[in-house]
Image (cartoon, rainbow, N blue to C red):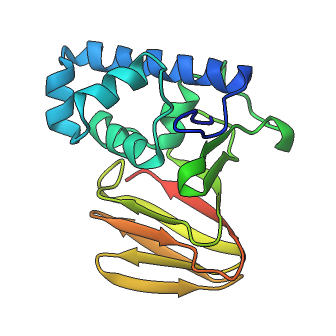
Amino acid sequence: MKRAQGGAEAPDAADTQLDTRLGSRLAALRAERGWSLGELAERSGISRSTLSRAERAEISPTASVLNRLCNVYGRTMSRLLSEIESEPALLVRAAEQPVWEDHSAGFARRSVSPPHAGLRAELVEGRLTEGADIEYDRPPVPGLEQHVWVLDGALEVTVREAEHRLGAGDCLRMRVWGPTRFRCAGPGAVRYALAVVLP
């Protein structure tokens, strides 16, 4: 998905359809709980305006916003995105793996594993451009287990104020309860595999 704000790249038809399905799903999750936009804003720390615009697909939410919503709804990002796709498949070819992008943050996230809401583990490919710095104030699901394996480049991961510098081939295992930070200081971009396991 590509955001089209302040001169950013305009979305194409596929991005617009994905944003529309995501907005509808977010609205449905809120309705299932009987929450107003104000209640969701209080629970998530996201402004009512941003929530309303995301549900109406006027904007594509950033990685940070989606992470907060996943936390409130008790879902991983992959699970949320799988809920707006068609029937889950056993095999997803590389060209068909959905890619979600936060252009302003320099972050791209490819859902490698075939989506299935009933499974506990998933595999994701992350890409950060040089200088990209993504901070999550909470995990989407408390106690989430993650394995970060750097494929190309260098990545700095901060967990509970402990900074880990990873080079190509290095792998960090962590259980996430609080804030995390993923930073690509360079030189160049970084590509990493992320295995996510529900507690």
Q: Residue at x 40, y 77 (%)?
A: 158
Q: Position of residue 157 (x, y in %)?
A: 47, 76
Q: Is residue 1 above or below residue 190?
A: above
Residue 10 at x, y = what percent?
66, 31
Task: Using the rendered image of the protein, determine whether residue 85 is visible from the camera's viewpoint.
Answer: no
Give the side of residue 85 with respect to residue 37, left or right: right
Residue closer to the observer: 106 or 152: 106
Locate the N terminus by quadrant. top right
> x and y percent of residue 167 in the render?
65, 85
How far across and how far down the image is residue 54, in percent?
41, 25
Q: Residue at x 14, y 35 (%)?
A: 42
Give above or below for 194 relative to 27: below
Number of residue marks: 0
- Give the left or right position of residue 140, taking residue 11 as reference: left
Which residue does the image show at 27% across and 37% down from the upper left? 72
For the question of whether residue 144 can be seen, the reply is yes
Examine the image and state in which quarter residue 68 appears.
top left
Instruction: Kindly give the residue lying farthest to the front in the view shown.
Output: 7
Residue at x 66% of width, y 18% of height: 86
Viewer-nearest residue: 111 or 118? 111
Q: Quadrant of residue 90?
A: top right
